[in-house]
Image: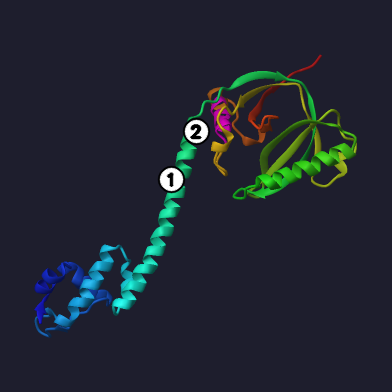
Amino acid sequence: MFTIGEFAQLTEITVKALHHYDDVGVLRPAEIDPKSRYRRYSAAQLRPALRLRALRDADVPLTSLAGVVDDRSAIAVLEGHRIELVAARAAQDRAYDRAIAIVEALAAESHVQVRDAPAQPYVGTVLRIDEADLLEDDEANDEFTALYSRAIEWGAAPTGTFWTTLRSGGDDTVEMVLCIATAEHPADATEAMGIEAGELPDRSELVTAWLGDQSGLVEGVLHPAVVAIFEELEERGLDTTMNNIRQIVLPDGGVEVVTTLHTTVVD
């Protein structure tokens, strides 16, 4: 029989770890002196101890060690742990790549300018979405296509300009409005459920075009141009509510982010 110190030296498992293995039932000593409470280990426990040491060196969780009773079960536990490590590493790599993409996108240059814009009629599809929910690109394209067709049916010729805006919908929800600019007001649009018709008035607005590569943007992350607009509004001491932010899809596939500074009084 070995003392706990001897057993620790032979297996290179610390005395503290052997005490802990005993406490959690992973490796109990062969006997414990009833008077001194000294732990003693047998030669037959060297193989199990060395297996446990090897698994712990491979970062196998202590909770998995209780199932290791022989070489076969040790290999099975190691293989299962390896699969988990590979999956975790893949997730870490994805998170790393995503972080790089976000940092690079935020570092891209955005110039915020002021411009005057004339009144613009529009029709829009109102979608109620949860704040944690994201509208996929294909879904948005389908909604825009349907709205485009309906605008033509109503006799309001679309001009080819599209934009989206978010606004509070109450009850912790957000409304996304998909808008199409039209040459005139459609007469029947307001009668359709989920459709609104309106007009952006003559106005001065802040605008910035995203100058970076659109493929470098990260889905589900606030657009860097939107960040630039919010920063400009805050510097001017103006309201930073998202209700006044419009993302305009440009013909070349780029994006403009626009917010109204003030409306223009027309004589």
Q: Which mark is residue 106?
A: 2
Residue 218: where, in percent of width, then height?
54, 41
Q: Which mark is residue 96?
A: 1
Q: Amino acid at mark 2?
A: Leu
Mark 2: secondary structure: helix
Which residues are the magenta region? 223-232
Q: Identify which residue, 92 or 194, lies in the foreground.
A: 92
Residue 118: where, in percent of width, then height?
76, 21
Q: Is 263 drawn above or below residue 144 in the view shown?
A: above
Residue 227 within the magenta-colored segment of the rendering = yes
Question: Which label lies toward us, 1 or 2?
Answer: 1
Q: Which mark is residue 117?
A: none
Total numbered labels: 2
Q: What's the residue at 52%, 26% (across, down)?
A: 109
Residue 222: where, in percent of width, then height?
56, 38
Query: Quadrant location of residue 234?
Result: top right
Q: What's the residue at 64%, 29% (across, down)?
A: 256
Q: Identify which residue, 182 or 80, lies in the foreground.
A: 80
